Image (cartoon, rainbow, N blue to C red):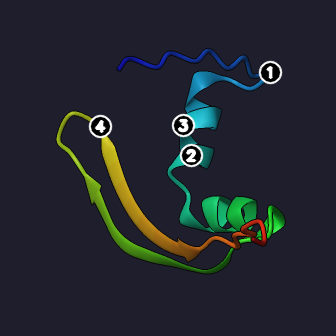
Amino acid sequence: MQFDAIHTYQQSADEVFAALIDFEAVKSKYEAIGQSDVLLVRRDEGDDGSVTMVTTRVVPLELPGF
């Protein structure tokens, strides 16, 4: 399955990339939508400029009653 999405930002590509790889910004985003216990597990930077960031978080889930 392929999934494509396009997002348009008013900031430069460098500014957007910096925000996406900033753990504190990512943590704030998750907390703003009600997630908790956000932890940075690992953050690796590749020689090619790529960044891999692994996080964990608690996502509230409401299941319908039966």
Residue at 67 percent across and 20 percent down: it is 7
CB contact under 8 Å: marks 2 and 3: yes
Identify the amino acid type marked 3: Phe
As drawn, the residue found furthest toward the bottom would be 37
**Amino acid under disc 4:** Gly
**Which one is nearer the viewer's eye here, 12 or 58?**
58
In the rendered structure, which disc, 4 or 2, sits on the residue that comes first in sequence? 2
| Number of other residues with Cα within 10 Å of mark 4, as a class: few under 14, some 14 to 19, many 20 or more | few
> What distance separates the C-alpha of mark 4 from that of mark 3?
11 Å
Image-quadrant location for residue 46: top left
Return the residue at label 4: 49
Residue plotted at (38% across, 57% down): 53
Per the model, the C-alpha gap separating discs 2 and 3 is 5 Å
Q: Is residue 44 left or right of residue 58?
A: left
Q: Is residue 28 left or right of residue 5?
A: right
Q: Residue 23 at what x, y percent from top left?
A: 55, 64
Q: Which label is found at residue 10?
A: 1
- Name the secondary structure under disc 2: helix
Residue beneath label 3, please? 17
